[in-house]
Image (cartoon, rainbow, N blue to C red):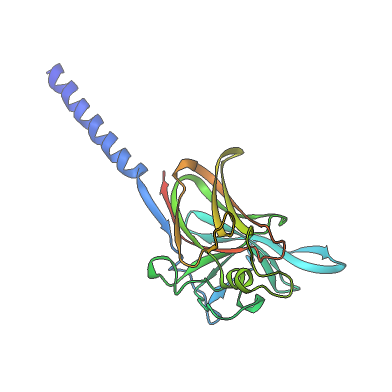
Amino acid sequence: MKRFFYSVIAILALFAASCSEEITQETVVYDFENQTLGETGYVNGPDKTVSAQKVTLYGTECTVYYGKLAYDNASFSNTFNETWASWSGFAFSQKNDKATAGFTNQYSVYANSGANNSSKFAVSYAPAESTPISNISFSTAEEVKKMWVNNSTYAALTMLNGDTYTPKFKAGDWTLLTITGFNGTTQKGKIECYLADYRNGKAELLSNWKELDLSSLGLVSNLEFIVTSSQSGVPSYFCLDNLETVKP
C-alpha cells in the first residue's frame, strides 16, 4: 500500500511539474495590433493617469506629463509636452509614408507596413541626452527573446539626402541603436544594431524590418533604448514591432 501511495505521489508531482513548465513558457508578442489609433493614425500621449507638471523649458513654462503608454504587462515610456504638443519616448502608429521628408512625417516607418506585413508598430524618439530616455518596463520581469526594428522615414531620408541641419551621410558616418536590459538595478547586457553604417567601405541603411535576438539579456524588468550617431543632427528615431517575451 505504501509503495502504491508513493507511486501516486510521484505521478502527481510529475504532472504538477509539467503544468508548471507550461505556465512558465507562456509566450507574449507585443505587436500593437489591438491599439486604437484614431483618425490621425498614431497615439503620442499624453498619459493622463499621471499628474501634469509645470516645467520651465528654454524660458517657457510648459505643462508636461511624464507617463507611460500601457500595453498588456508592459509600459512604454511617454513624455508629452502639452504646451508645445511635443513628445519623446514612445508613440504607437500605423503610418508608412516613405516619401515625405521632415519632422511632419515623424510617425512613419521606412517600410510598407509593420513587421511581417502587420498594420501597427511603435515609434521611439530616443536621443541620448533625453531624460528620461525611451524605455519599456514590465510589471513583472519577463524573459526577452527577440524584436524587430527599422528606421523611421524621418530619420532615413535625413541620412540619405541631408537637410537644413544634417549633411547627407558620407563614408565613415553611422547611426547606432543601443538596447540595455535591466532586472531591477542589475544590468543584464547590451544589444547593438546599426540603423545606418557607412564605415569601412559600406553604405548600408536599414530600410526593411530586421529581427534582433535579445535572448542574451535573459529575464529583465526594463529595456532602455538610445540612438547615437556620428552626425549630431540625425533625428533620434527608430521603429519597433513584435517584441517577443516569455512571461513567468
Residue for point 62% across, 58% down:
174
Indicate the position of residue 95 as horizontal and vertical percent values.
51, 76
Answer left or right for 69 relative to 121: right
Answer left or right for 205 relative to 104: left
Residue for point 43% across, 63% down:
31
Count of labels in the image: 0
Indicate the position of residue 101 as horizontal and vertical percent values.
62, 78
- Most foreground residue, 95 or 43: 95
- Most foreground residue, 138 or 224: 224
Q: Residue furthest front?
A: 201
Residue for point 30% across, 43% down:
22
Answer left or right for 173 relative to 58: left
Indicate the position of residue 109 as horizontal and vertical percent values.
52, 71
Indicate the position of residue 112 as horizontal and vertical percent values.
45, 75
Answer left or right for 91 relative to 143: right
Q: Pick the quarter of the image with the N terminus.
A: top left
Residue for point 70% across, 71% down:
86
Q: Residue furthest top?
A: 2
